[in-house]
Image (cartoon, grey):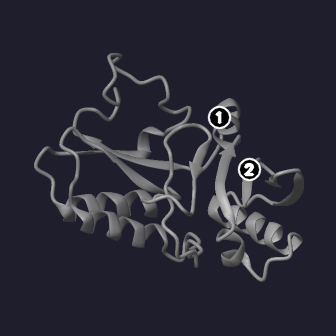
Amino acid sequence: MWIVDIDVGGTLTDGIFTSGEQVFSAKVDTTPHDLTVCLFDCLAQGAEKLGFADTPAFLEHIDLIRWSTTITSNVLAELRGPRIGLLVSKNHEKDLYGADPRSSILNRLLADKDIIGLNGAFDAAQVTNAARALLEGGVRSKPKTSCANPLNMPELSSSATSMAASPASPRPKQSTQSNPVRFSASKPAFFSPSSTA
């Protein structure tokens, strides 16, 4: 069985594939628009180097995949990255739920114009319209919600995803993997095809 370590860098994604004393490496271009593309490109290159018929056949022989990235720390250090939209509760557009009247990340990591406050009794149409306004205004990351009354409306998630995957932004590449994948919130992220979701 194989253990796979993949590190997504700003330009290149490196993979290390180990099984006992065997060690192989792979290097592919990073795809900033969708990091799952370079993840699966690296797995595909590893599968080819190791003589597997295809990536799914290789995945059947993997015990653990450790996936990490330096992209977030690079974005924070360089103060650059994709425009992100944020939907918050009305009157929290400036403080972003913090103690200070104006959050220190405003106009550094997040532009004032990319934050929309929603009234407490918002509905699916208001959220969809706000997300559309952010996307039409140039936001390229799927709008995030951060409201005092969290959304438990699955239709909002699918509608925001549909808008984010419009022709203005690339559609995500679909995985052909049939095994359940479990992600851990720890850093680096771990998932194992043989784990249960």
Direction left: furthest residue: 121
Q: In front: 57, or 126?
A: 57
Residue 108 in which image quadrant: top right
Direction top: furthest residue: 100
Residue 97 in which image quadrant: top left
Please, is residue 26 above or below residue 78 in the view?
A: below
Which element type, helix, strand or loop, lies under badge 2? strand
Please, is residue 55 above or below residue 15 in the view?
A: below
Q: Name which residue type carries label 1.
A: Leu
Q: In front: 173, or 177?
A: 177
Find residue 105 and report its horizontal and vertical position in percent.
50, 28
Find residue 53 and report its horizontal and vertical position in percent.
78, 83
In the image, 191: left or right of 196? right
For label 1, count other residues whose C-alpha is less than 10 Å away and answer few (under 14), some (14-19) or many (20+).
few
In the image, 163: left or right of 13? left
Which element type, helix, strand or loop, lies under badge 1? loop
Question: At 65% from the left edge and 57% from the top edge, which residue is drawn?
Answer: 63
Any mark on residue 5, and which? 2
In the image, 153: left or right of 32? left
Q: Name which residue type carries label 2.
A: Asp
**Mark count:** 2
Q: Quadrant of the N terminus?
A: bottom right
Question: At 34% from the left edge and 69% from the top edge, which residue is drawn?
Answer: 158
Name the mark nearer the viewer: 1 or 2: 2
In the image, 42: left or right of 25? left
Kindly report the distance in space between the C-alpha atoms of the residues bearing marks 1 and 2.
27 Å
Question: Mark 1 sits on what residue?
Answer: 79
Question: At 18% from the left edge and 43% from the top edge, which residue is drawn?
Answer: 149
Residue 41 in which image quadrant: bottom right
Q: In front: 21, or 57?
A: 21
